[in-house]
Image (cartoon, helix red, strand yellow):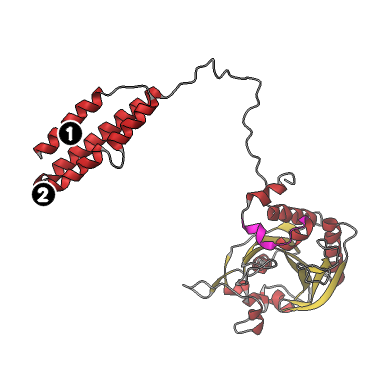
Amino acid sequence: MKNLRDQIENLRQEISAFQTQDLSQVEEFRIKYLGTKGLLKNLMGLLKEVAPEQKKEAGQLLNEFKQFTEAHYETLRAASTPKASAKDTPADLSLPGDAFPVGSRHPVTLMRNQIVSIFQRLGFAVAEGPEIEDDWHNFGALNLPAHHPARDMQDTFYIQQNPDWVLRTHTSSVQIREMEKGKLPIRMLMPGRVFRNETISARSHCFFHQIEGLYIDKNVSFADLKQTLYFFVQEMYGPQAKVRFRPSYFPFTEPSAEMDVSCFICDSKGCHVCKKTGWVEILGCGMVHPNVLTNCGIDPEQYSGFAFGMGVERPAMLKYGVNDLRLFSENDVRFLKQFTAAT
């Protein structure tokens, strides 16, 4: 221990006496004392020769000496580094300031806002609801009782602690909540995020955004539904857009249909987005099923209505020419910056 203490003291005096402003000599100092084969490394090797009861004290001495050496090295390095004078770097006050990057709204948000604004011109208001829903609002009230085979149409995420609660598979649950209020007539839009256990690809994802519409009043017909959706397509895609309705099935509407628009990405010639058909399905629709009205306390003999629902991502793909739905959720700044001007 005495040998170690004496060596540390001798080196401390030697280091204190070392002064220079030459960078090459400072580097030689670092190699000699702090390098991998330097004197400090050799001192650390002497620690194994110290008696066990003195190792703690010896370790403290070595750590203090290491800190002293490193501090002296930093002082030498700072003193030997050339300092730029004000004469060498005059300030150019005519230079512009540093530009801050401009943010942008997400293309899905832009599309959501545009869809909502179109339907608001027709008198639709906006309603929202919870993303974690009970079975009744997500399925039961929508004419989907327990064990109904149509439940298999939607691959559902169930809450493990309570299977009666799910991540909502559609915003139709908000329609039920609005109808349960009993304030008629109803003309509402329900935008929001929904979840389905689907394979992620260029055309589908396990979560996406949806907007549903609901109109309940006396004497509402399927012709009212078609005219509303024709207006939406013309406003969204322009007069050149073509539309077609195909018969379909949804347990909460009768009759039901799916609406396609001509694919703008390939100009209806056929691509992987439209599955080589020239058409892209953008929404499902139909007349509200009488059972749904009854479940919500509305007399189907007095009132009728229509409902429609669309994903937000697919219209955005058509609008902005995006050929892969996954781009919307990858948070690639290079992709998102393209929409700065659109905000």
Indicate which disc residue 230 carries: none
Q: Look at label 1 and name its amino acid.
A: Ile
Q: Tell me if I can see residue 312 in this picture.
A: no
Circle 1 residue: 8
Secondary structure at numbered mark 1: helix
Is-magenta flag for residue 329? Answer: yes
Label 2: how many Cα within 10 Å (few below 14, some 14–19, many 20+): few
Q: CA distance from mark 2 to mark 1?
A: 19 Å
Looking at the rendering, the stretch of residues picked out in magenta corresponds to: 320-330
Q: Picture quarter containing residue 244?
A: bottom right
User: Residue 79 vs residue 61: left or right?
Assistant: right
In which quadrant of the rendered view does residue 78 lie? top left
Task: Give percent across and percent down for residue 215.
Answer: 77, 65
* Image quadrant containing the N terminus: top left
Label 2 sits on residue: 52
Residue 138 at x, y = what percent?
62, 72
Q: Provide residue 167's location: percent of width, then percent of height.
A: 57, 68
Q: Residue sitting at 51 percent across and 71 percent down?
A: 159
> Is 238 part of what is drawn in magenta?
no
Camera-side residue of 326 and 310: 326
Q: Residue at x 80, y 55 (%)?
A: 118
Q: Amino acid at mark 2?
A: Pro
